[in-house]
Amino acid sequence: MRRFLRGLCSPLLSLNPVIGAGGGDRQDLWNETIKLFCGGMPLRRHWVHFRCYDCSFTGSEAVDYLHHLLRRNHNFGPEVTRYQTLQLLRKFLKAHVIEDIKGRHGTEDFEDNGHLYRFPSKSPLKSFPVRPVLRDSSDLPRLIRWDDYEEVPQQENFAPQTSAVMTSDLWNKRHSVAIGDVHECKLIRRKEVTSKQVDQVWKSMTIAHLQSALGLETLEGVLNPVHVNGKHIVHNVFIVNKTGIVVLENKAEDMPYWVVSAMKCLANWPNGNDSKQPAYPGFERDVLKTVADYFQRLKEPLLTFHLYDVFVNILSLLQVQDMATEALQVSCLLLPPPNRRRLQLLLRLMARVCQNVHLPPLNDTIATRTLMVQMFSHCVLGSPDEMDLDELLATKLVTFMMEHHSTIFQVPNKLRRQVEEHMSHLKRAQIKYAGSDTDFSASPAFCKQISRVECEEQKVIGTQTPLEELLDGLIADKELPIKDKRKRLKQVRTQRVNLVKKILCPSYLLSFPLFFKKIVRRLPK
């Protein structure tokens, strides 16, 4: 088993091992971390109670090796602490990645001491069920089209499409200007765009922008569109105060007053301390503990379980600041407004505490910056799966978000501009001609293929019939003098001949002069 793991991991082992270098999801990170640990952990013979155990290692040796491995990896970095490494090894023991020398796992607790452990005989790699494939593109939200006059339904039921065969009546209406029968036109205002349509546009375009920002061909397995609420996006974009913090309409969803007061006190120290509040040595530490207790008791991380895979995919972009910032800007728009507000206030607090030189040390052994990241990272990002790397991934991501909190909560200019242009297009007026009951803006998606003979026949029928009707009406007009009728007929013939040459078949073009002669003979002498 040991040789198998070394052979499996030999391409991954290097001076600077990279876990999930391709920016894959958390499943790849979990499996590749196990591969590197199992393939590189030094094993040797140990003696316990006069008994020899080959290919084993102590708990302290495992913590030393894995801690060194994680700190050198760009996905986790030097922020990883020894305690977080110990927590990960406890997950390894529970998932049967490792076991103690007596074969026990799951119920035992991994200890950072001289207790002996070993690798199990079976493969420790974690298997995952295959995600179902999307049925078709209709599973994804679509943009509102210009011809959508009614509210967009949640699910579309497509009716069978009928072929478009151009009849003489339709040809007459569409080409009324060309044949001389000019109808009066008017502007038809589009119905007012509903709030549901606005939400749908923001949802569709935000998801598309997120896919582009992450550099993925598809969001399958990363984000389910069902978990995206267009109302949340619109709220996060427009209902904010002058500093960009989300304003909640329902105050019951906001943080308790005492938590907000404690955060203000700590963020503006020492000016934020109310004169009515007690001031004693260690007061600032008690205030921090009050804030931490509130966030650590939340039922779900601020970035939510549904969006966990989205933010894990952003980890691979952290080395390119602009790309990571844009991806975070779009991803944070998907948060429920209460979560986005809490996250904004928390990251701003963390940044101010780290930059405040007047604030006394908040811990005797840990630097303030490291303390803030360790204390709140799990409150920001977490996985519903216990067998995961959420603590390590959260440390890396939260550190970046804390350092760039002033920009990641801005709405991307490109996304805002695209939505505004699309909404402007939806509100444009439509031109319709009097007597035309057909809306060609909603034309069929396909046309029926016809033979060449049918095409020639439709050309004749589509032009000769309405032209005959026009000339018949001119001849039947009793109020128009004969001289004027002849003059009008001559004008029609000279003005339309070029158009007829373009649209009529050659065989009909030859009979065109005879057609007018026949009409003129019908006039009285």
Image: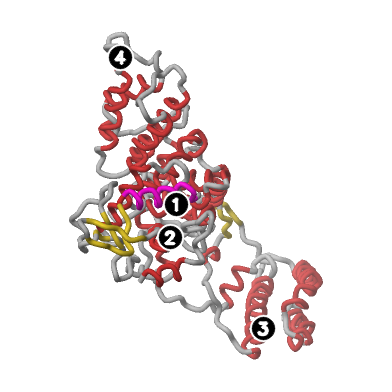
Please rate how many residues cluster around mark 2, counting C-alpha atoms within 10 Å: few if below 14, some from 14 to 19, many from 20: some
Q: Residue at x 25, y 52 (%)?
A: 115
Please rate how many residues cluster around mark 4, counting C-alpha atoms within 10 Å: few if below 14, some from 14 to 19, many from 20: few
Q: Which residue is mark 1?
A: 69
Colour scheme shown = secondary structure
Whichever of labels 1 and 4 marks the residue nearer the N terminus, that label is: 1
Q: Residue 115 or 279: which is nearer the viewer?
A: 115
Whichever of labels 2 and 3 marks the residue nearer the N terminus, that label is: 2
Q: Which amino acid type is marked by label 1?
A: Leu
Res 246 seen here: no
Q: Quadrant of residue 446?
A: bottom right
Whichever of labels 2 and 1 marks the residue nearer the N terminus, that label is: 2
Q: Which residue is mark 2?
A: 40
Q: Secondary structure at mark 3?
A: helix
Q: Secondary structure at mark 1?
A: helix
Kindly give the residue lying farthest to the top in the view shown. Answer: 275
Q: Which amino acid type is marked by label 2?
A: Gly
Q: Nearer the viewer, mark 4 or mark 3?
A: 4
Tell me the chief SS of the magenta region. Answer: helix
Q: Is residue 229 inside the magenta stretch?
A: no
Q: Are marks 2 and 1 in contact (CB under 8 Å)?
A: yes
Q: Residue at x 47, y 42 (%)?
A: 78
Q: Nearer the viewer, mark 2 or mark 4?
A: 2
- Boundaries of the magenta span: 60-73
Q: Residue at x 65, y 89 (%)?
A: 452
Q: Which amino acid type is marked by label 3?
A: Val
Q: Is residue 72 inside the magenta stretch?
A: yes
Q: Residue 490 or 203: which is nearer the viewer?
A: 203
* Mark sitting on residue 460: 3
Q: Which amino acid type is marked by label 4?
A: Pro
Return the x and y of residue 457 as percentages of the image width and height. Answer: 64, 87
